Image (spheres, grey):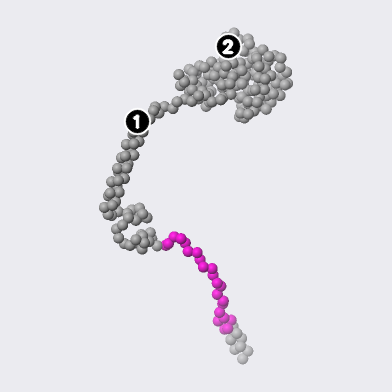
Amino acid sequence: MRNEVTADKQKQKRTKKVPKVKQEPTRRSSRSSKPRRILNVEAWGDHDEYDPLESDYSGSDDSAESDEGTDKKKRRNKKMKRRRISLSPSTTPKIPKPSDLERERYAHDGWMLLCACVLMTRCSSAATKEKCIGGFFDMCPKPSDFGTLDPEELRKMVHSLGFQVDRVRSLSAVTTAWLTRGEFGLDLIPVEKGGQKIWGAGAFTVDSYYLFAKGDKEWDLLCDIDDVKWFRGWLRGRD
């Protein structure tokens, strides 16, 4: 008897209904799963009309007229393009006026230009270069004033540029050469080999001197710096 009761209880447990969990309605996608052509047929009917969704539509005489109109439009645009080209001025761009390069400000004085080049090399900050170069010329407006400067004060003035010891030495070499050489010249050949090299004045300084101070538009560049090449192009194109 007890076994029968236990069996009935187990049967009731197995047959007991599990309450259903209410599920939230799923959001339908805005795109239908039906093919595009079926949607077009349902919307406009299965007849030969223009279907903007069908890129491979072909059929009716309207397409031929549309193709003809497109060809006319292409020919008209091509004709207008040729007209614009024929009426346009020379396609060779005019070289603009030089920008406010630091070297242009001192191009009127060769010594000042050389000193500015020595101070601006190996420094990327335009504000720092302008501050130190202007401060140096406030201390030493003429090459003859260089000998009266306090070396320690001069090093402090150019300290923010970096390499202050080398820069002071280069300024001294430039000033000495400017005051002692009769007909001033400058190149990269050492003096002991018959050249006119100045300590600390590299290709950038030499090119800048002959382009900015001397205005030599035929000068063969020694460096590969963009604004130096640009300025030589401006010199050649301004005539």
Whether the residues at callouts 1 and 2 have beta carbons within 8 Å, the answer is: no
Query: Which residues, given as a range, are shown in magenta?
Result: 11-33
Q: What x and y, as percent, mark residue 62?
A: 28, 52
Indicate the secondary structure of the residue bearing disc 2: loop
Instruction: Check residue 86 in the rendering and tell me which mark sits there, or answer none.
Output: 1
Q: Quadrant of the N terminus?
A: bottom right
Residue tagged by mark 2? 184
Mark 1–mark 2 Cα distance, whole angstroms, equals 51 Å
Q: What x and y, as percent, mark residue 141?
A: 66, 16
Amino acid carrying label 2: it is: Phe
Q: Quadrant of the C terminus?
A: top left
Q: Can residue 223 be seen here?
A: yes
From the viewer's perspective, tell me whether residue 173 is left or right of residue 229: right
**Along the line of sight, the residue nearer the viewer: 76 or 175:** 76
Q: Dot 1, crowdedness within 10 Å: few (<14), some or many (≥20)?
A: few
Q: Dot 2, crowdedness within 10 Å: few (<14), some or many (≥20)?
A: few
